[in-house]
Image (cartoon, rainbow, N blue to C red):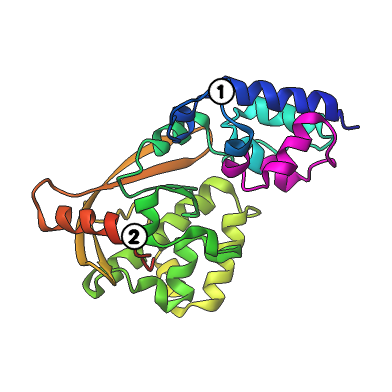
Amino acid sequence: MSDLTSLGDFLQRRREALQPEDVGLARGVRRRTAGLRREEVALLSYMSTDYYARLERGTGPTPSEQMLTALAQGLHLSLAERDHLFHLAGHRPPLRHAGTEHISPGMLRVLDRLDDTPAEIVTELGETLRQSRLGVALLGDATLRSGPARSIGYRWFTDSSARAAYPPEEQATLSRVYAAGLRELVAARGPDSQVAALADDLRVRSDEFAALWLAHEVGARPPAIKRFLHPEVGRLELSCQTLVDPDHAHRLLVYTAQPGSESAEKLRLLAVIGAPGGR
């Protein structure tokens, strides 16, 4: 059973507890609202302000699981708070497991402060969950992808356009890296897991993947310097720093260029033109 009155009260309390800088928004002037404004939460949760306001007042329809998931991320809820939100709406919370797509508030706070740096939060399958503004400009908009194609490893072996952003001389190495990574994940998650089903699908769809799978290589790692071919600014050489959230099996990838380098200048240009990449 849902309790929409308590749900509205919980949403209001969480909104009032957050400040704009907590979620990567500018504070602005003449701010009188305690915490975030309703329209700011609606923006962060990809819904209309009217719909969100009705939820707070307890007069709206019972939100769907999809809406609750969006609210949990928009309000930077912890897993316990997310589960409470689902219970108030009369839904069973998503299972807690390593493959969850719920991003921890701490990792979101870090990403929110990287607006001028290419960065993305990815799952263990290489599914991009959230990107910085410059991350979208460098790598493309992850929200345009769905199904198995959300995984970079899956796209790598099934969609030739996924390789366009990488120099040809490095593509064989990256193929080994993605195949080895899937091998390790299947062993860790088991034969009945999502990653095992994805590997089975790839063995049918890609002769290259099937051959690499038979080699049973593990431990392959990408080059220390990541090289990209961007359609607007050309070749970039970037270091990739990784922050790992072991509870969620998420990684925050931050791409940086050596100060004073040609790639650093190209990143500054990319920040201005904001052209989408092609990963």
Q: Give whichever of 104, 97 is nearer the camera.
A: 104
The prevailing secondary structure element of the residues shown in magenta is helix
Q: Residue lying at the far left in this picture: please name it.
A: 260
Q: Few, some or many C-alpha atoms within 10 Å of disc 2 (few <14, some 14-19, many ≥20)?
A: some
**Relative to 61, is 21 on the left or the right?**
left
Q: Is residue 62 magenta?
A: yes
Kind of residue indicated by mark 1: Gly
**Relative to 189, is 219 on the left or the right?**
left
Q: Is residue 246 magenta?
A: no
Identify the residue at horizontal 40%, vertical 58% (top origin).
180
- Whether 7 is drawn above or below 68: the answer is above
Question: Which residue in the structure is indicated by mark 2?
Answer: 274
Instruction: Report the span colored magenta.
Output: 42-69
**Relative to 277, is 258 on the left or the right?**
left
Identify the residue at horizontal 62%, vertical 29% (top origin).
79
Q: Quadrant of residue 200?
A: bottom right
Q: Give whichever of 22, 159 is nearer the camera.
A: 22
Identify the residue at horizontal 21%, vertical 53% (top origin).
268
Q: Residue 32, can we see it? A: yes
Q: Few, some or many C-alpha atoms within 10 Å of disc 1 (few <14, some 14-19, many ≥20)?
A: some
- Whether 256 is drawn above or below 217: the answer is above
Q: Residue 59's x, y, as percent?
A: 85, 35
Kind of residue indicated by mark 2: Gly
> How far, Cα to Cα, is label 1 from label 2?
30 Å
Q: Give whichever of 118, 269 is nearer the camera.
A: 269
Q: Residue 68's x, y, as percent?
A: 71, 40
Q: Residue 242's x, y, as percent?
A: 33, 41
N-terminal of the pair, mark 1 or mark 2, is: 1
Question: Which residue in the structure is indicated by mark 1?
Answer: 35
Q: Residue lying at the far right in this picture: please name it.
A: 1
